Amino acid sequence: MRDAKLKILLLDQGRQSLPFVKALAHAGHQVFIVCNTRISEGYFSRYPAKRLIWPSYMKNPIAFEKKLLNFLRSNDIDVTLSVGDISSEILSKNREEICKYTKLTVPEYSKFLEVSDKLILMKFCMKNDIPCPITYGLDEHGNSEATREIGFPAIVKPRRGLGALGVQRMDSLENLEENLFSLNNKYGPLLIQEFIPQEAGTQYQAEAFLDLDSKMKVCMVIEKPRFFPVHGGTSTANVTVHKPEIVRTCKRLLEGIGWTGAADVDLILDPRDNVVKVLEINPRVTAGIKIGFAAGIDYADLHLKLALGKSIPAIENYKLGIYCRNIFMDILWYLFSSRSMKQTTKPSFFRFFGKNVIDQTISLDDPLAGLGFFLNMTRKYLNINYLMEKLGTGKRGPSTKSLKRHEVNY
């Protein structure tokens, strides 16, 4: 397979796709980007060679899979990349068939499911003394042994899911029993987890990359000072930091489970014992992966090298102090946060410019992409049902207490 001028199919239209399509285009490759709507950052970007409008893999995954397979059978695509949860799962699930037509970076489906299931992951961590919250499975009738050991308050969340959807704090056994059926019915299998107070703690994520031998070659650590919703959800601001203990934990975890390719590991500093603990693994790059490119790590090139079976270079050093924001979401954080949160947040919300300050979607060299993101987010948040569910106050949701600022942000 040729090394230059590759034809690359990128299955995601979101903000994490922007640094990928830019880096690949600058490297001379021809990138076809898949969008489910023209009102998106990927469609508005100047860098794709071609924009494809396909069915949404979130709303109609079967139609998306059919479109994908037909397209690959009739077009010469060298590498197919995914940078989202659902697109990565579709590629992994259909890996054997898709690999007849193109190169992939996703692992075998059994491994993908193992990592995506938060209960299986937490059991692996507890068995191998990798720091994590105490976690048990939870059936529709509850689990008295688990609740006795974990105590209350406790966190209940789906074993598989996106973002903070379905994550609830339970303050008592009665509170749990009252809401268990509706949660299980809405989100599927659940787990119950030790509650970790956020006060005096900090959340992190590690952007790791492993080669075909499951050797970790890259691990960039990011601190996450702000979220929307403010009690926990999507990070609205990130900063690159140096945390060797987090790198060691991720190495033990990811190499231990035999992972390959990209992994986004979420962690939290537990203020009770001052230990950083694993919360979950997302089997793809973070939505804010632009921070990694700005820190000097070309994750697009790492994906290509993995797909083509080339050696993955070890990258131990990256630029520290890169401050990457999602200004649209950060404004929502500011509107919904308390006065004390506004005063104590670091870096400051009002730090808009500087040598190491960037935005996830806004850039001078690709200005319309930021507009596409703004229009897409505006359309989402004008939907009152979407906003209420995001805030955890939807009428259809269970009546549990929302998480506060000084509680774990899952």
Image (tube, rainbow, N blue to C red):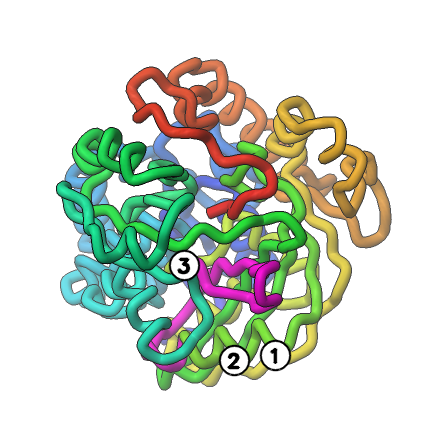
CB contact under 8 Å: marks 1 and 2: yes
Q: Residue at x 57, y 83 (%)?
A: 314
Residue labelled with disc 1: 315
Q: Quadrant of residue 328?
A: top right
Q: Is residue 56 visible?
A: no
Give whichever of 220, 344 is nearer the camera. 344
Instruction: Look at the picture and state if 290 lies above or below 272.
Output: above
Closer to the chain start, of discs 3 and 1, is 3
Residue labelled with disc 3: 280
Instruction: Look at the picture and state if 177 lies above or below 101.
Output: above
Q: Residue at x 85, y 52 (%)?
A: 355
Q: Residue at x 37, y 42 (%)?
A: 34
Residue type of the residue flagged with mark 2: Lys
Q: Residue at x 40, y 25 (%)?
A: 389
Mark 1 nearby-residue class (10 Å; few <14, some 14–19, many ≥20)? some
Give whichever of 12, 349 is nearer the camera. 349
Q: Is residue 392 visible?
A: yes
x and y percentages locating residue 352 in the rendered image: 81, 38
Q: CA distance from mark 3 to mark 1?
A: 23 Å
Residue type of the residue flagged with mark 3: Glu
Q: Nearer the viewer, mark 3 or mark 1?
A: 3
CB contact under 8 Å: marks 3 and 1: no
Residue type of the residue flagged with mark 1: Ile
Q: CA distance from mark 1 to mark 2?
A: 6 Å
Provide the residue span drawn in magenta.
254-279
Residue 217: mark in rendering: 2
Instruction: Look at the picture and state if 242 lies above or below 70.
Output: below
Closer to the chain start, of discs 1 and 2, is 2
Q: Quadrant of residue 244?
A: bottom right
State left or right for residue 19 relative to residue 37: right
* Residue sticking out furthest to the right: 354
